[in-house]
Image: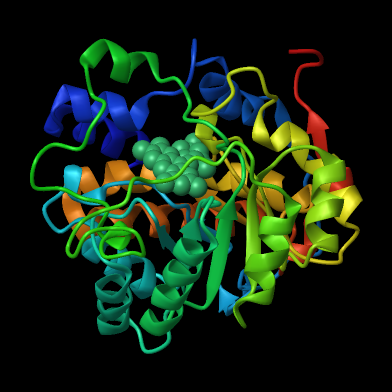
Amino acid sequence: MTLRELHERARKTLDPVVYDYVAGGAGEERVLAANERAFDDYALLPRVLRGSAVRDTAVDLPGAPRTAPVFVAPTAFHRLVHPDGELATARAAAAEGAVLVTGTAATTAVREVVAAAREAAPDPAVWFQLYPHPRGEVTAALVRRAEDAGCTALVLTVDSPVFGRHARDLRNGFTDLPPGYAAENMRDLPGAPPGGLLDIPMSPEAGWAHLAELVRGTALPVLVKGVLHPDDARQAVEHGAAGIIVSNHGGRQSDAVPAAVDCLPALVDAVAGRVPVLLDGGVRRGSDVAVALALGARAVGLGRPVVWGLAAEGEAGVRRVLATLRDEYDHTLALCGGRRNADLTADMVVAKGGAR
Ligand code: FNR
């Protein structure tokens, strides 16, 4: 079954309001569409007579040595789409040797998520995503929670100073989690009543000092997610980031930004090899993975496709999504005359049809 078919099954399975929450983007959804379309405009020039029957596609990421080049990007509220929720996603990612980014908006506590990943693989890599919080003690408590659970890196999402405006959710009146679901990691934090929850924060006044403080307060590597301007990538590295995730939040924040992959080359240049650059947004097939890696990404993240796999088939569906992308990517690498990821180089990526 292709990713497209899994998406279709998820659409038929899900409550239309939940489907819209996952599928939708900000504003007129121009960026949402552009992320996928941008990949259509790139073609790969294969190299010939230099291939290998045995290919090595593993990559080293912060807190995740020899991992798959495709990781699970943080997406909120997995229990909304499948009763096993994040536990299923965690087992699937671990079994497929892929990094799972869980985080602030998970409907399962991080301790349980990491425990589930450990059921599926001896040494899984689970990262914890958080938003800047105006109160440092809240961030510190979340970081301790992620560390104690066994997460191996943190991800600070910086593209959300305010909530994106999602027309579909506004139209559907979907503004709160239904009863029975909660962002479990936000429970029992400083300032909340016992057993109570804090809201997921948006901090329009967060600054680089926030990143520096986060880096100082943990031994874990900290990646910065949601960077599109090359100067911000430089600043992130200077403030201690262990990696940059080029992302426009899957088109869910600003509807006026470029497609994620179109931003990648400038950020790769700016970072100049000091830390790994990762990318998410619009990755749907193995050749998309190959284009991103050729343009300098160390790894790529999947957002919605993982949620569709989870909704359609639970843990098996997430495994199917990750395995499909891995197999397609390996096949593309073979067709490009590659034996390892580094054999894909920027000169092999060309514009397909001229101007978009
Ligand atoms: C997201 N994304 C996201 N990112 C983040 O940093 N924290 C979060 O809580 C969420 N939540 C979330 C929910 C849903 C339903 C979606 C679809 C996305 C963004 C996500 O990490 C990633 O950047 C995009 O989803 C990548 O684009 P694709 O693969 O969905 O095209």
**Place of residue 106 in the rendered image (x, y in percent of width and height, measured from the top left):** 31, 55
Seen in the picture, residue 282 relative to 151 is either above or below; the reply is above
Residue drawn where x is 28% and y is 24% of the image? 20
Image quarter for residue 264? top right
Labels in figure, total = 0
Colour treatment of the image? rainbow
Residue drawn where x is 56% and y is 28% of the image? 36
Ligand 1 sits in which quadrant?
A: top left
Seen in the picture, residue 55 relative to 238 is either above or below; the reply is below
Seen in the picture, residue 130 relative to 21 is either above or below; the reply is below
14 vs 118, left or right, is left
Which quarter of the figure is the N terminus placed in? top left
Residue 7 visible in this rendered orientation of the protein: yes
In-front residue for pair 162/105:
162
Seen in the picture, residue 240 relative to 165 is either above or below; the reply is below
154 vs 43, left or right, is left
Which quarter of the figure is the C terminus placed in? top right
**Place of residue 158 in the rendered image (x, y in percent of width and height, measured from the top left):** 62, 45
Give the residue at the far bottom of this rendering.
Answer: 122
Image quarter for residue 187? bottom left
**Place of residue 46 in the rendered image (x, y in percent of width and height, measured from the top left):** 77, 47
**Place of residue 150 in the rendered image (x, y in percent of width and height, measured from the top left):** 41, 82
331 vs 15, left or right, is right
Residue drawn where x is 33% and y is 33% of the image? 22
Residue 81 visible in this rendered orientation of the protein: no
Residue drawn where x is 26% and y is 26% of the image? 175
